[in-house]
Amino acid sequence: MKIGIYGYGNLGKGVEYAITQNDDMELVGVFTRRDPATVNLLTDGAKAYPAADIEKFKDEIDVLVICGGSATDLPTMTPALARHFNVVDSFDTHADIPTHFARVDEAAKAGGHTALISCGWDPGMFSLNRLYANAILPQGKDYTFWGKGVSQGHSDAIRRIDGVADARQYTCPVDAAVQAVRSGAQPELTTREKHTRLCYVVAKPGADTARIEQEIKTMPKYFADYDTTVHFISQEELDAEHKGIPHGGCVIRTGKTGGNQTHVIEYSLKLESNPEFTASVLAAYARAVYRLHTRGEDGCKTVFDIAPVDLSAESPETLRAHML
Amino acid sequence: MKIGIYGYGNLGKGVEYAITQNDDMELVGVFTRRDPATVNLLTDGAKAYPAADIEKFKDEIDVLVICGGSATDLPTMTPALARHFNVVDSFDTHADIPTHFARVDEAAKAGGHTALISCGWDPGMFSLNRLYANAILPQGKDYTFWGKGVSQGHSDAIRRIDGVADARQYTCPVDAAVQAVRSGAQPELTTREKHTRLCYVVAKPGADTARIEQEIKTMPKYFADYDTTVHFISQEELDAEHKGIPHGGCVIRTGKTGGNQTHVIEYSLKLESNPEFTASVLAAYARAVYRLHTRGEDGCKTVFDIAPVDLSAESPETLRAHML
């Protein structure tokens, strides 16, 4: 199938990598709001085009993977593109998913296309595991822990503080909380008890580090509800030790069945590159979107609607013989 | 939906428990090859009937959950019943799944019914996680570890040895192997390196325990390829300490994405009752089978073919708003 990539940041590059690992996929081109001449692709022979030219490629792209941000890009981008293309996005503002779904569904149906939103690992694989675990254990309790991993949003929030040159923030699960959950005891945990926040900050020359640390630790929503540790380091150390984008976490559901028997279901991810892994999930779901469209199943979908068989390049017979 | 249970051992009892946890399910009756008068059900008002009378209930049962054994029951039971009912089974002889699938598919289609085979946790939830992880990380390596848990087959094998009164065998994953896999190093592991076998044996009075231990440790297929530990204990100790049927394990896939980044995907289960958990999975898939049948999607299916949304009692809107 022929894949287009719309947006070429870390996620878009990850999709390009993922296409090289899937023999049934081919990159048509990358569409960017930057000057295409300045964009260096990884794929031999592939080209970057102006985002504004996307509609000229209507007949050449089977699935367009939209690699924009959830805050401002995707709410308008995905509905607009779903009129003309089968699309996949990674919209991750959990509270706004129903609105985004309705808009994309209307556009995709109007255009006779298939769209899949909120794909990746959370929302995405974590959501799937919440659903499976809830269906199996109706009487139980869900927990999600994130990290240890880099939060781009929290890193950005620190960078906006006066006197900060650069910053990297790690979200860390509290090990004692994870262990308590795994025991099946179903503890009630506060925000503070579940995660800590670890910040590496480069201060500008002469900046008041005590004030910066105080501003971070008291920042509402982002840090005030957490135990936060701040380390001031040099730009060189930040660049050397903290330029990766690792992430991960786990979804745990514990519950009881009739004979008062306790069960623990856990799904966990340890990712060296958050965007490359997310992109790999998007690529697998692009395959499913293509198949659904081929079968005439148009409109907006989520990971909940996709039968696992549609994600695999292998035939149903092979899967039953070797993976079941 | 109206559920029938065909076979009333540990698994059948587990399904009965699971029905009580799912408000949209109702138990029609239990069908047994034993004298129904000797069977005590847990559900008020529910009745046990002779298995031979099952066809009289054709119009009263939406989904029949077949709780027989894979060795001799299910290969004939499931195709025979799929002609007259929508069915779910837990057929777990991995190598024979394609044959079983073909037989059940033919019968279900001939009868206009929907069947789902090889449901539970392995095959079942473990299979699903193998498929998802392979679709996301095409370049990687799969590992499955089982335990610590009771293997009924291995316990039975010990009981067949001359001089053995009772036995319980635990399959145990080797912690060092699990840790090596989790590191992403993709080790090559032999059978012996992955699992050990721990046996609690009650010898008959006067039996030669040295000979029994030797027979266990050298038994082909079951024990010879493993490091096996044998403890002789009293029947009282076995009854007091080893009457539970716990199990579990984990499916791990590690792989790399384009930028040489390593990722670890792990799904793990810790189950206090293997049959009750398996039964809970069967109940969730019975819901999906009912829905597929309602939509006219007949024939044989596996967990690979079922969209997650069909497992849940919640509406798609609720799932998107609260679980995605």
Image: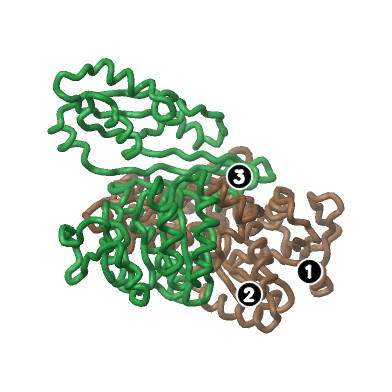
Chain colours: A brown, B green
Residue A128: image x %, image y %? 48, 60
Which residue is more in the foreground, B118 or A171?
B118
**Disc 2 marks which residue?**
A297
Q: Residue at x 31, y 29 (%)?
A: B198
The residue shown at (65%, 52%) is A314
Within 10 Å of disc 3 (Cα), the crowding (few <14, some 14-19, many 20+) is some
Could you give the CA–CA distance between mark 3 and mark 1, rounded to whole angstroms? 28 Å
Can you tell which mark lies on residue B106? none
Which residue appears at 21% of the width and 69% of the height? B46
Q: Residues within 10 Å of mark 2 (few under 14, many from 20)?
A: some
Q: Is residue B80 above or below residue B297?
A: above
Q: Give the residue displayed 66% in from the left and 54% down from the top.
A: A313
**Of helix, strand and loop, which one carries label 1?**
helix
Q: What residue occupies the far front of the structure in this picture?
A: B52
- In whole angstroms, how far apart are the C-alphas of marks 3 and 2? 39 Å
Q: Position of residue B203 (x, y in %)?
A: 20, 25
Q: Is residue B135 visible?
A: yes
Q: Name the residue type under label 3.
A: Gly
Q: Which residue is mark 3?
A: A244
* Lower position in the chain sequence, tag 2 or tag 1: 1
Horizontal and vertical percent for residue A32?
Answer: 77, 64
Q: Is label 2 in a helix, a strand or a loop?
A: loop
Q: Check whether the beta carbons of the residues at disc 3 and disc 2 lie within 8 A of each other.
A: no
**Residue A208 visible to an observer of this rendering:** no
Which circle marks residue A51 in the picture? 1
Instruction: Look at the picture and state if B228 lies above or below B49.
Output: above
* Residue nearest the viewer, comparing B56 with A108: B56
List x then y, in percent, for residue A148: 48, 46
